[in-house]
Image (tube, rainbow, N blue to C red):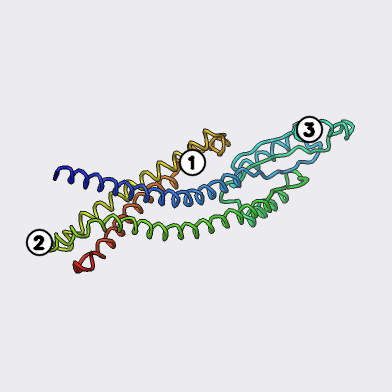
Amino acid sequence: MASTKKNFLKSKTRSTFLTSMVTISLVLFFLNLFAAGAIYSHILFEYTQENFEVMVELPDHVSAEKQAAFGSFLEGQPFVKTLSYISKDEAGSIFSEANGKEFMEIMDGLNPLPASYNFKLNIDWIQSDSVEKIQNLIESQNILKVQDVTYPIAEIEQLKENTYGFIKIGILIGALVTLIAFFIVNSTVRLAIYGKRLMIRSMQLIGATNGFVRWPFVKMGMLQGFLGAVLANLLLIGLVFSLRFLNLGPGAVEMDGFTLNEMLMRPEFLFLSGGIVIFGTLLGWLSSSWAVSRFLNRSLDQLM
């Protein structure tokens, strides 16, 4: 009979532990999801703006020597990340492929598109005032007179505004989820400890100190928080690979070598994973400490 009762209590304790751990992992998973969304938005914004190009349109009938000298001039500038040359014929072919071959027919075979040098900017130069300085520098050089210098700075600024707006909303939601996480985890741990309130009282009656009574529950709470955080990280990684497998996320395609797999190995995501584990462990510690303290120094009537 005693053995049956012991097995029942052990099973109930294990069930309570698993329930608390799963609850913690789900709460931390949603917190992880919002944080990862904010980080991914910032990374995607940086990737997108780095892939916008400045297009310098060259005049027609420019000599090969001046064209080469101008290319060398651009290549030596600190703001140029990558440089490419598109000839007049290549520009016409690209436009025709994008808009249909009717383009050349409408123009009676004449190609009005100029040759151009296109280059991507280094990240430190992707600012409105920096782009303006670059434009002035290119237009004032004396190698050749360029037709136009274009860069989609308006699109960049709009993208920046949208991205940081999303990040601010994500931070607010993340803070709210953090508060909800604390109260949910605290309630879950408190319910788990509630079933052992009489045992706590019995330990006190035989002379156990508050610290001695508190430590096993705090240790269990920290373990629940740690394991819950690890499970939350695994759920996030599983979600990423599920999106890739279903062809629903950017990990399904490569963007100039940038894949979702590589993004998971970026320092930001490694710090996030480690931070979630630390946060989960601290959450378990705080919640269990607070929950146990509610049952210490109470009378038997209050515990019943």
Q: Which amino acid does label 3 sit on?
A: Ser
Identified at 20% across, 54% down, the residue is: 216
Q: Position of residue 293 (x, y in %)?
A: 25, 64
Category of crowding for the residue at label 2, using alpha-carbon neighbours closer than 10 angstroms: few (below 14), some (14–19), many (at least 20): few
* Outermost residue, front side: 1
Viewer-nearest residue: 219 or 186? 186
- Numbered disc 3: secondary structure: helix
- SS class of the residue under badge 2? loop
38 is higher (above) or lower (below) than 260: below
Q: Which amino acid does label 2 sit on?
A: Ile
Disc 2 marks which residue?
Answer: 206
Q: Which of marks 2 and 1 is nearer the N terminus?
A: 2
Q: State which mark lies toward you, 3 or 2.
A: 2
Q: Which amino acid does label 1 sit on?
A: Met
Q: Which of 270 and 152 is in front in this view?
A: 270
Q: Disc 3 designates what residue?
A: 96
Q: Nearer the viewer, mark 3 or mark 1?
A: 1
The quadrant the N terminus occupies is top left
Identify the image quadrant of residue 248. top right
Q: In which quarter of the image is the C terminus?
A: bottom left
Please report contact status of discs 3 and 2: CB closer than 8 Å, yes or no.
Answer: no
**Which residue corresponds to mark 1?**
263
Which residue is at a point 31% across and 52% down the rendered structure image? Answer: 281
- Distance from the alpha carbon under mark 3 to that under mark 1: 35 Å
Quarter occupied by residue 86: top right
